[in-house]
Amino acid sequence: MEQTAKMKELIGRLQEAAKAYYAEDREIMSNREYDALYDELVALEEETGMTLAGSPTVTVGYEAVEELPKERHESPMLSLAKTKEREELKEWLQGKEAILSWKLDGLTIVLTYIEGKLAKAVTRGNGEVGEVITNNARTFTNLPLQIPFQGELVLRGEAVITYSDFEKINEEIPETEAKYKNPRNLCSGSVRQLNNEITAKRKVRFLAFSLVNCKSGNTEEQQPDFENSRENQLEFLKSQGFEVVESKKVDEHTILEAIEYFAKKIETYDVPSDGLVLAYCDLEYGKSLGRTSKFPRDSIAFKWADEIRETTLKEIEWSPSRTGLINPVAIFEPVELEGTTVSRASVHNISIMKGLELGIGDRITVYKANMIIPQIAENLTRSGVKHIPEECPACGGKTHIQKVNEVEVLTCTNEECQAKKIKSFTLFVSRDALNIDGLSEATLEKFIGKGFIHSFSDIFHLDRYKEEITRMEGFGEKSYNNLAESIEKARNTTLPRLIYGLGIAGIGLANAKVICRYYDYDIEAMQKADKEELSEIDGIGVVLGEAFSSYFAKEENRKQLEELLKELEIEKQPVNSAEQSLAGMVFVITGSLEHFANRNEMKELIEERGGKVTGSVTGKTTYLINNDITSNSGKNKKAKELEIPIISEEDFLKML
């Protein structure tokens, strides 16, 4: 039977996508494509009256992975029926009041508190069985570990990572293919770590969205009375210290206005959301409605209807990355989507290009996934993939098509490709090095990919490409002028900043200052220094000494520095040995400062006087600087334990 075969095919594809998404933290199809396949399956099941084993319309999520302990939920965590029609939500109310809130795109967690303390945290898993992640939940940035209520409290909420934190964390991952595609993937991987130290670094937040159970203990504590109101339950959770998902109480007269409020806010909302949830305010009424085999009847999900525009594909831009991957980006005639002008969308790899049969001049439809990320929905004319570059646009090296996990990707075979050295360029323009505003890692990657930058000195000649840069998305005359001004300002720098910016292995700004002072800021002498002499410098040692001398032993590195020096004005700071009053001393700075703008300013002064600044108190520390000498902070306790003097800023200034 043709319909049965089609249903089996759809179930297989949806199961594969669900496994990748829920169990392996990766995506093999967009949300839009998944929803379209799911809706097609639902239609076939209704038409045939048949539901096959394994259908995602009767199963929820995917099985939990093996590495974490599993636990069965006391009550099943069902998914929600969904709609994209605003009027349908209005009809669904049936004249009742309801709570409208964000549908957050993270990982659903069930928390249990007993006698005021967090006792258990379990992921949603497949809705029936989840993974126990209690230790990881304790590291969530905003989760109360102890609450006023002393009975048993069970609640549900979403673990999320904000877009801003997601960007910061992703920037630290050097390999493009290892980067997380979205905050949901990063959150899922973070929450389910075996080592909760990793979870702690990911800045996971918890937003409560429903109360499951609330029982007073054997104390005289009074059982809370929520007066049959979901709104009161959420207020109670707030009173216990939980951050609760933003919501609005609505009825059939106010719901459309409330939806519009959320629709506008999502454009700048920092927490990932893929829609809204509408739940009856009357708890008993909602409970009386019961449930289907998959959905509860007291709530419904609303997913944003994608705004789709038709346009023409102008070109495929090939963007090299630090891992050697050359990623295709579709450039099309600009269209207005969700209030912004869009003219480009990542195609990700050659397999997706071939699936879309994407060719120059094709008529395509584009949309913003979750109203944020531009994507190609369909190719209407499908002229076919042509002209995959045989040379890398960054270095001219030969390209190669290879399969990675059954996905075809284009790579650069040149090990010396500038795009592979993006981290070195990022360091060179960083705050402690040349401090060039406007050259983020993403911007550098674009400039290198277009062949604007091959070496450090090329950064000072970007004016050659002014016309191309001002036409790039995200740039314009003003952005270019700001960048040009920052580059000119960076021409005046210090030798330690330059040495640090070269990216010599292990040489930080503090080490660079020590070496510069030792050689009296003589760059020629520094280039000729041998490892034995360098290793004798206090604070440098054998490993750093060898790294420094090996760097300048290479002719290409000396030539690079020579070219740079033609572009820069180096501020010479001759050292007067009489001013090295802090030589041999090790300081730790903590707490707020009054006489210095920040800790870095104080640190620079200490280093200029021959001292050293570290981050933690050890037996080698000479002084801990803290204006609150009586504080019970960890550093103060450690200093007292080791009998290390704690001094204030005033004491330090007198010492100078």
Image (tube, rainbow, N blue to C red):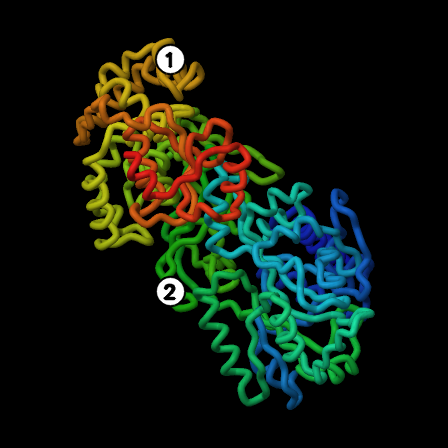
Above or below, 552 relative to 18: above
Q: Is residue 109 above or below residue 558?
A: below
- Name which residue lies at 45% across and 72% down: 264
Q: Is residue 295 left or right of residue 87?
A: right
Residue 8 seen in the figure: yes
Q: Which residue bears the numbered disc 1? A: 536
User: Dot 2: what SS?
Assistant: strand
Residue 438 at x, y percent in the picture: 30, 47
Q: In the rendered structure, which amino acid carries the disc numbered 1?
A: Glu
Residue placed most toward the observer, 564 or 43: 564
Taking depth in this image into account, of 337 and 419 the one nearest to the observer is 419
Placement of 91 over or under 437, stated as above or below = below
Residue 46 lies in quadrant: bottom right
User: In the visual, does 180 lie left or right of 647?
Assistant: right
Secondary structure of the residue carrying tag 1 is loop
Q: Which of the two residues, 139 or 187, is positioned nearer the viewer here? A: 139
Q: Position of residue 171 (x, y in %)?
A: 46, 43
Q: Is residue 368 left or right of residue 4?
A: left
- Marks 2 and 1 sit apart, C-alpha to C-alpha, by 59 Å
- Give me the disc on residue 525: none
Is residue 384 visible in the rendered image? The answer is: no
Q: Which residue is mark 2?
A: 340
- Picture quadrant of residue 341: bottom left
Q: Which of the two discs, 2 and 1, labels the residue nearer the N terminus? A: 2
Taking 120 as reference, is 409 above or below it? above
Badge 2 amino acid: Thr
